Image: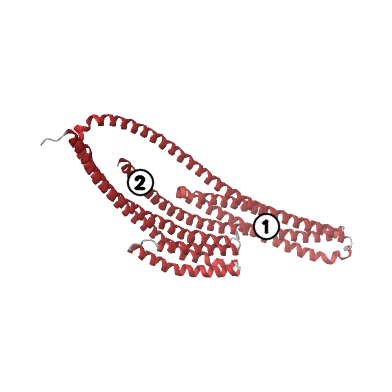
Amino acid sequence: MNIKLSTKLYLGFFVTPAIILLGVSLYSMISFGQINQQVTALYDDRIVPLKQLKLVSDAYAVLVVDAVNKAHEKVTSMETALKSIEKASSEIKEHWQAYQQTNLTPEEQKLSREVETLFVPVNQKIARLQQALETGDASQLDAYDGPLYEVIDPLTQKIQELINLQLDIAAQERAEVETVYDRIILFFGLIIFVAVVVASPIGFFFSQSITNTLKKTLQVVSESSTEIAAALEEQERTANQQASAVNETTTTMNELSTSSKSTAEQAESSVMDSKQALNLTENGSKAVEKTLDGMADLREKVDGIAQQIIRLSEQTNQIGNISKLVSDLANQTNMLALNAAVEAVRAGEHGKGFAVVAAEIRKLSDESQKSAQRINTLVTDIQSAINSTVIVTEEGTKTVLLGVEIAQMTASALMGVSDSVNNVVLNNQQISLNTQQQAIAISQVLEAMNSINQGSNETANGLNQTKTGLQRLNQVALELQSSL
C-alpha cells in the first residue's frame, strides 16, 4: 500500500504521538489527582491534628502546671495564674473540638474516647484549683502539686499515643502515595522504553543535539545544587552554633540571677544584724552611764551577776551544740552534693543542669560549714570572755563598785549577741531548707522538661520526615508536569 511521505510523517510525528500523549496525559491527570487527594488528606487529617494535639498536650503539661508553680513560688499573682489557667482551658477545648472535626479512623476514635474519659478528673482538679486561686490563699496550692501531675501525666501520655498514631497513619498514607508514584514511574518507564525502541532510529540525530544540551544544563543545575546544599549546610551549622551559644548564655544568666538574689538576701540579713549590734552597743553605752548611779546596789547584785554569767555560759554551750549540728548538716549536704554530681556525670548530657545545681548546693554547704566554724570560734571567745568577766567581777567587787555594774550590763549585751548568733544559725538553717526544696523543684522541672523535649523532638522528626516526603512528591509532580 503506497502512502505519501507527508502522510507517513503526519501519522508518525503527529497522530501517533498525539494518541500516546493523550493517553499519558489522561493517566497522569488521574495519578496526580490521586496524589493530590493523598497529600491533602495527609495535611488536613494528619499534620494539622498533630499540631492541635501538641497544643492540647502543652497546654496541660506546660501552661497549667507552669501557672500553678509560678503562683506557688509567688513569681506571679494568683489572679494572673487564674487567668492563665482559664486561657489554657479555653485553648484546650478549642483545639480538641477542632481535632474532633477531622476524619478520624476507628482506632483514633477509640483513643479519643479514652482521652475524653481522662479529661473528667483533670478538669475536676483544674476546677478545684481555680477555686483555690480565687480564694487567694497560696497555702492551698501545696495540695495540687503532686496530684495535678498524677492526673495530667496519664492524659498527656494518652495524647502522645494519639500523636504517635497520627504519625503511623501518615506513614501509611505516605506509603500509598509512594505506591502511586512507583506506578507512575513504571508506566512512564514502559512508555520511554517503547518510545526508545520505536523512535530511536528516527530521533537518533535529533536526540544527540538535545542530549548534549540537556547534559550541559543538568551539569549546571547539579553544580548549582551542590553549591546551594553546601551553603545551606553552612547556614544550618551556624544556626546550631548560635542556638547553642544562646542556650549556654541563658543558663549562665539564670545561674547569675540565682547567685545575685542569694547574695542580696545574705547582704540584707547582714545589714539587719549590724543594725542590731549597733543598737546593742548604744544600750551598752547607756548602761555605763547608769553604772554611776547604781554603785550602792553592787554587793546585792553580785550573786545575780554570777547566775547570769552561768546562764550565759550554758547558752553559749547550746550555741556550740547547734553550731556543731549545722556543721554536721553541712557535711551531710556536701556528701549529697558529691553524690548528685557523680549521678550527673553518669547521666551525661542530660545531667549538666543537675550538676550545676549540685555544685551550687555544695558551695552553699561549704559556706554553712565555714559559718559554723566561725560561730564555734565566736562561742569559744565568748566563753573565754565570760571567764575573764568572772575574774574581773570578783576583783571589781573588791576594788571598784562601778566595774560590777558594767559587768552586769556587759552580760546583758552578750545575751543580745547570743540572740543575734542564734538568728544567724536559724537563717542558715532556713537557707539550707530552701536550697533543698529548690533542688527538688528544679529536678522535677528538669525531668518534666526533658520528657516534653523528648516528645517534641520525636514529633519534630516525624513532621520533618513527612515534610521531606511531601517535598519529594511535589518535586516529582513538578518534573512530570514540566515534561508534559
The answer to whether residue 249 is above or below residue 313 is above
* Quarter of the image where one finds residue 14: top left
Q: Which mark is residue 474?
A: 2
Question: Label 1 is placed on what type of residue?
Answer: Val
Q: Position of residue 331 (x, y in %)?
A: 57, 54
Seen at 74% across and 54% down, the residue is 274
> Looking at the image, can residue 405 be seen?
yes
- Other-residue count near label 2 (Cα within 10 Å), few / some / many at <14 / 14–19 / ≥20: some
Seen at 85% across and 58% down, the residue is 288
Disc on the earlier residue, 1 or 2: 1
Question: Between marks 1 and 2, how big is the CA–CA gap?
Answer: 71 Å
Q: Which mark is residue 424?
A: 1
Q: Is residue 180 left or right of residue 60?
A: left
Q: Position of residue 450 (x, y in %)?
A: 46, 54
Q: Which mark is residue 438?
A: none
Seen at 56% across and 63% down, the residue is 83
Pick the residue in front: 293 or 424: 424
Q: Position of residue 346 (x, y in %)?
A: 45, 49
Considering every residue shown, the one lying at the far left of the view is 1
Pick the residue in front: 45 or 188: 188
Seen at 48% across and 50% down, the residue is 351
